[in-house]
Image (spheres, rainbow, N blue to C red):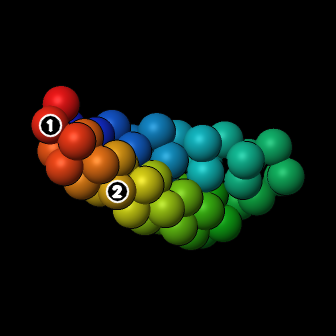
Amino acid sequence: MLFSLAGLLIGAALGAWRARARGGVGKDIAQWAAVWGMIGLVLGTLLTIIVVRTGG
């Protein structure tokens, strides 16, 4: 199950995109990417737990 890794990568990409759209510089983009990546990681982990517990 690679939902966690997928969530991390998608979250980081979305965070970086959002920071660039708001006119952020390098450190802003990195921070947004890190935070959104962590959020995606948590959501991916929860999805993995749900899939495993439901027998999928």
Amino acid at the residue labelled 2: Leu
Could you tell whether 28 is left or right of 36 in the image?
right
Residue positioned 14% across, 37% down in the render: 55
Q: Nearer the viewer, residue 49 or 14?
A: 49
Q: Nearer the viewer, residue 20 or 41?
A: 41
What residue is disc 2 on? Answer: 46
Looking at the image, can residue 48 be seen? no
Disc 1/disc 2 C-alpha distance (Å): 14 Å
Measured from the top left, where is residue 4 in percent x and y?
A: 28, 48
Residue positioned 19% across, 49% down in the render: 53
Measured from the top left, where is residue 47 in percent x and y?
A: 34, 47
Residue positioned 39% across, 62% down in the render: 42
Kindly give the residue lying farthest to the top in the view shown. Answer: 56
Could you tell whether 56 is left or right of 34 in the image?
left
The image's mark for residue 55 is 1
Measured from the top left, where is residue 15 in percent x and y?
A: 61, 51
Q: Quadrant of the C terminus?
A: top left
Residue 7 appears in which quarter of the rendering?
A: top left
SS at mark 1? loop
Query: Looking at the image, is 15 positioned above or below residue 27?
Result: above
Amino acid at the residue labelled 1: Gly
The numbered mark, 1 or 2, whose residue comes first in the sequence reads 2
